Image (cartoon, rainbow, N blue to C red):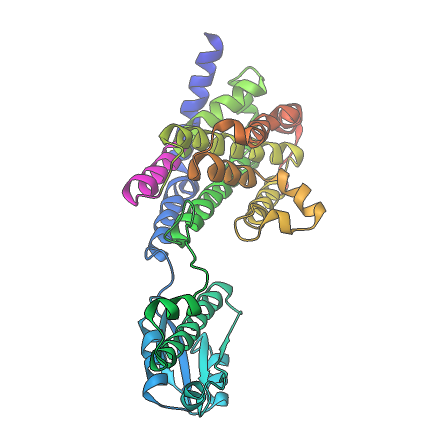
Amino acid sequence: MNYLSQIYHIAIRELRILWTNPIYGFAMVAFPILVVFFFTSMMSEGVPTDMPVGIVDLDNTSTTRSLERHLDGFQMSHVVGRYASFNEARKAMQRNEIYGFLYIPKGTTDAMLAQRQPTISYYYTYTTIAAGSMVMKDMKTISTLGSAAMGQAVMQAKGFTNQQIQTLLQPIKIDLHQISNPWSNYNIYLTTVMVPGIIMLFIFLISAYSIGTELKFSTSKEWLAMADNRITIALLGKFIPQTLIFLAIVFAYQFYVFKVLDFPYPGGPWMLVLLGVLQVMASQGFGIFAFGLFPSLRMSMSICSLWAVLSFSMAGSAFPIMGMDSPLQSLSWLFPLRHYYMIYQICVFNGFPLIDAWFHFAALAAFMLLPWMVVGKIKNAMLNYVYIP
């Protein structure tokens, strides 16, 4: 009972610190909420739409103008300019006015009618990979459709039946099924890794900051004295209030995206709850470990910031881990966000059983236990170190 009383009084002390220091309010509540609404509203359409493209139509026939109208009708492309020459369109793309353009040379229609295989070119920028790839997809599609439409007209004039035309134009019919995210919704697969990653960044920083400020404001001995110099009791009392606040933020985020925005989660709500608990406690474990490893407010927060920022690259959401060099593949296991992302993919997004991601659950549990390796060093720092700005 004495231990519980000490934890309770330290937790009350921590709540007063959280209430009086505005940094905690911003980093634990305000900024995470802002991040959630920023990312979900920024990609509320699911995919980028109406990206600017141009047309260089030197043929200027009803057939080529039809291609332009069809391109403009696609969801992701919007024709914003017609250019008189290739150089004008190229300069517009260099000025970032358009992401790509379709080049139709003079005589294209006549060549198609005479079955001389004219060449239609499309140019796109990969400075912005997502925009460039989507614009390329639309322009490639419209070029293929234009060729098919002209071929259909020629074969109809020669007396081919519709069945024969269909077989010649599309010998193999494709039945496409996109698994888990059939809408190709960027919001679903980017928000669900970016937002948790940023929340984990805040947890890293606050965990290291809350211990480091005990040294900075010379309250470390008072803090330990409330626990009879038992560092484990002191840490439990300090971090229980923070854990509850961060869990409330994480569960509110999950409710918003999975219930209000209706993101798919075949794994069920209890898997989300388990993942949220592991996310918060593993992040706190890493933050405490970072301070124990480098008992300096500035150094520990720098390590937490670096590790959190690198996590976005090493999680595997933007670039697949299997495509990285072997040393980087091994290094990726040292980032909590990587394991969070894999559990989300396997057990929440695809609904596979927990056993399929057991290693990632074990890894997050290991991050939770990291503070046990440095509790002695933290206690020594609280009792003997002097804060150096």
The chief SS type of the magenta part is helix
Q: Where is the N terminus found, in terms of image quarters?
A: top left
Residue 43 x, y percent position in the rendering: 36, 56
Total numbered circles: 0
Q: Quadrant of residue 8?
A: top left
Residue 106 x, y percent position in the rendering: 45, 92
Q: Nearer the viewer, residue 119 or 185?
A: 119
- In this view, 334 is above or below 274: below
Residue drawn where x is 42% and y is 53% of the image: 176
Left or right for 42, reference 204: left
Q: Quadrant of residue 329?
A: top right
Left or right for 48, reference 119: left
Q: Which residues are magenta?
A: 247-263
Reply yes or no: does residue 248 show up in magenta: yes
Q: Where is the C terminus found, in terms of image quarters?
A: top right
Q: Nearer the viewer, residue 53 or 197?
A: 53
Q: Nearer the viewer, residue 230 or 134?
A: 134
Query: Can residue 56 be seen here?
Result: yes
Q: Residue furthest left?
A: 260
- In this view, 118 is above or below 262: below
Q: Residue furthest right?
A: 327
Query: Can residue 219 be seen here?
Result: no
Residue drawn where x is 34% and y is 50% of the image: 37
Q: Residue furthest top?
A: 1
Residue 339 x, y percent position in the rendering: 55, 37
Left or right for 40, reference 5: left
- In this view, 235 is above or below 78: above
Residue 122 x, y percent position in the rendering: 48, 78
- In this view, 366 is above or below 147: above
Left or right for 182, reference 209: left
Residue drawn where x is 47% and y is 38% of the image: 344
